[in-house]
Amino acid sequence: MAMVTIRLPQELRDRIDKLSERSGRTKSYFIRQLVERGVDALEEEQRELEEIRAAIRSGRRGFKTYSMDEVLEHVGLTRMDIGMDPERGQPTKETRQPSSAKGPKKAGVAKPKPTTNRVSKAPKKQ
């Protein structure tokens, strides 16, 4: 078995030490478990992404599409939060921090109206 050295914040190391002491298992056991679970999750995400990409490339129908404004609303952001002019949809001169990083939104600030721009397949060549 290969040995790998990693740097961990002291708080995380302390938590692993406590797990080890309480369970009677080695720290290496827990770290291996965590790495294996993380790799499994990342591999699954990659498989899912590749399936989506393949479906898009093949032109498979049945996927719902969302406008950028719908996605931004879902995650609690506005066009201004990502540095876009709310009216023209173009980048602004000054990009602000996302609203989630600034704390709660101020009352009375109007959100831009959703547009009907939808993501769609490229036009067919004639």
Image (cartoon, rainbow, N blue to C red):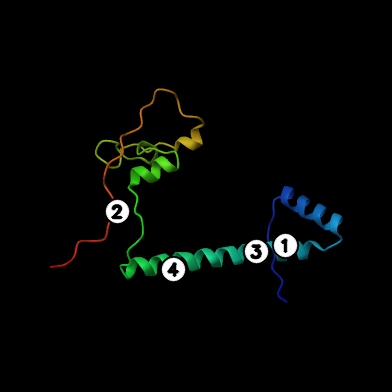
Count of numbered badges drawn on the protein: 4
Which mark is nearer the camera, 3 or 1?
A: 3
Mark 3 or mark 1, earlier in chain? 1
The crowding category of the residue bearing disc 1, from other C-alpha atoms within 10 Å (few below 14, some 14 to 19, many at least 20), is few
Q: Is residue 74 left or right of residue 122?
A: right
The crowding category of the residue bearing disc 4, from other C-alpha atoms within 10 Å (few below 14, some 14 to 19, many at least 20), is few
Q: Is residue 117 above or below residue 26?
A: above
Q: Is residue 92 above or below residue 122?
A: above
x and y percent of residue 100 in the render? 49, 37
Name the residue that disc number 4 marks.
50
The crowding category of the residue bearing disc 3, from other C-alpha atoms within 10 Å (few below 14, some 14 to 19, many at least 20), is few
**In which quadrant of the rendered image does the C terminus lie?**
bottom left
x and y percent of residue 76 in the render? 44, 38
Name the residue that disc number 2 marks.
119
Q: Amino acid at mark 4?
A: Glu
Disc sitting over residue 37 in the figure: 3
Mark 2 or mark 3, earlier in chain? 3
Q: Amino acid at mark 3?
A: Arg
x and y percent of residue 54 in the render? 38, 70
Which residue reaches farthest bottom? Answer: 1
Q: Judging from the image, what secondary structure is the residue with disc 4 in?
A: helix
